[in-house]
Image: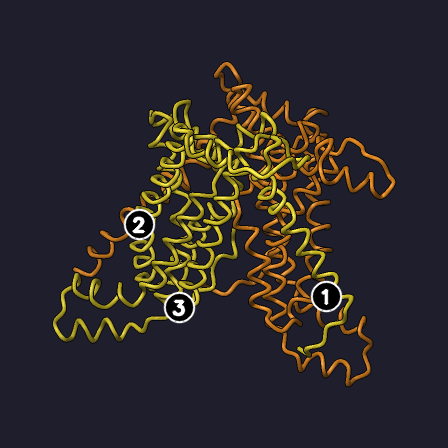
Chain colours: A yellow, B orange
Amino acid sequence: MEKKSSSLANLFLLFIFFILYAPIFYLIFYSFNSGGTMSHFEGFTFDWYRELLHDTRLLIIVLNTVVIALLSALIATITGVLGAIGIRSYKRRQTRNTLLSLNNILIVSPDVIMGASFLILFTMAGVRLGFYSVLLSHVAFSIPIVVLMVLPKLMEMSSSLEDAARDLGASHWNVLTKVTLPYIAPGIFAGFFMALTYSLDDFAVTFFVTGNGFSTLSVEIYSLARRGVSLNINALSTLMFVITVIFVVVYYYLASRSGTKGANLRR
Amino acid sequence: MQNKTFRNLFMLPYALWIIIFVIAPILLVVYFSFFDINGNFSLTNYKNFFTATYLQMTLNSFWYAFLITVISLLIAYPTAYILTRTKHKQLWLLLIIVPSWINLLLKAYAFIGIFGTHGAANRFLEWAGIGSRQLLFTDFSFVFVAVYIFIPFMILPIFNALDKLNPSLLYAASDLGASKWTTFRRVIFPLTLDGVKSGCQVVFIPALSLFMLTRLIAGNRVITLGTAIEQQFLVTQNWGMGATIAVFLIIIMVGFMALTSIRRRGV
């Protein structure tokens, strides 16, 4: 397209960027406020950050969140990669499409429905609400994303590569570990990363399936925010913003290397 | 064949996932919708759903979701259009996406501060001579924050569609004497309709089910289908009614997907 943008268009774009970023920087700005509210800036302080670091309960919650994210992403990646390889091995188009539609159900279904139905499921199955129910649901909603990130890479791989390996006497296991997995590795990393961010970001599903004793960061922020403004949350969000930006940079680096176009379907 | 057993081994965890976390939850939701609060099999929930209160709520929820989708589209389309004409468009696009990676609850929390009685928004209104007023806990703030959250998700698919547009089509249109508006109406918009549709999909369905926003920002003044489901499951503990509303939300979702379906290429 022609590279001509009027000043009016630039102004509009500037306005959109302002709207998008102003609330975030508003939060960050007041995290340094000694006043204790989000409206009057009295003086500069690091108190809220100090308080954050001494809040053991919160640190445990952060640890929970990270453990859940890493574990669920790992399990989801393994299951998803195996599933994607399985899906590819079906030669009939219809079978593949059916599997893919089933795969995508959880991606399109609203969080509330997922949360509510998982709550019923765990109660029926007798799983106690807490760490395991949260972990299982995070694994459950991450698997389809991993499949979607890995499958294009698999489809792109020519099957003659595997045929050649087999002709040369490689076992199934060797073909998998020496040919297939290295080829689709960028897709696997991208999938793992997406699963990680989905898990870290999730609130609604966790809110439904978490019991009394267990909490993740999102759920904790929700219950704090319902009680009103406290600048602890601002300090926390500043730290999370910095971590998020690092994540985005790493993710885009991985995605540009793997060439998968993902990240479009975020809730 | 040995190949097949190998494949079945691969598919086992994935197939288990499909059965336990995709198919079973949906069946359980449908099953539970047929039980009243005392655990008796009945159609009471469905009868209740078709009373004025619930129909009114469903309509309201629809109206808000519609409003949110339309406003997001009206802001996102020009933004995406201008973005495709900037020099470093991938970088600008990345900057648009970054806010969408930030935890939704933190963004909502920021608006509790901004829309608060002494917050930035009210100070701006005072400065503009309009005078401060109650902003938080109104339906205006709910729609505003929801649009804020969804804009990046709307921009992304539209940007991709606009970016794929062949510029020679635009040259042809102007060579044939079409005005800018005619070109937009007859060439650009129809060709980017798929992007608009998938943008509407990622906004409309979550907009029906966001319950944390209604709780935090709208202070229970807005009840969406999502809020109602959360209320029934976690507050009232009437799972049957919650499941019934969930069934209708699923039906609405499937209907909306069919309405805005695009001819998708296989992955």
Q: Please report whichever mark, 2 or 1, sits nearer to the chain's N-terminal start.
A: 1
Question: What x and y, as percent, mark residue A198?
Answer: 45, 46
Q: Dot 2, how many residues are within 10 Å of its Cα: few (below 14), some (14-19), or many (20+)?
A: many
Q: Residue at x 46, y 34 (%)?
A: A50
Q: Residue at x 35, y 58 (%)?
A: A189
Question: What x and y, as percent, mark residue B235?
Answer: 54, 21
Chain letter of the residue beneath label 3 in the structure image: A
A4 horizontally vs B45: left or right: right
Chain letter of the residue beneath label 1 in the structure image: A
Q: Dot 1, how many residues are within 10 Å of its Cα: few (below 14), some (14-19), or many (20+)?
A: some
Q: Nearer the viewer, mark 2 or mark 3?
A: 3
Residue under label 2, please give it: A79
Instruction: Find the distance from the CA under tag 2 to the CA under tag 1.
Output: 46 Å
Instruction: Give the answer, above or below, for where A167 lies relative to A92.
Output: below
Instruction: Find the distance from the CA under tag 1 to the CA under tag 3.
Output: 31 Å
Q: Residue A10 — which label?
A: 1
Question: What x and y, as percent, mark residue B170?
Answer: 71, 79
Chain letter of the residue beneath label 2 in the structure image: A
Instruction: Please give the count of numbered marks on the rendered protein.
Output: 3
Residue farthest to the bottom?
A: B175
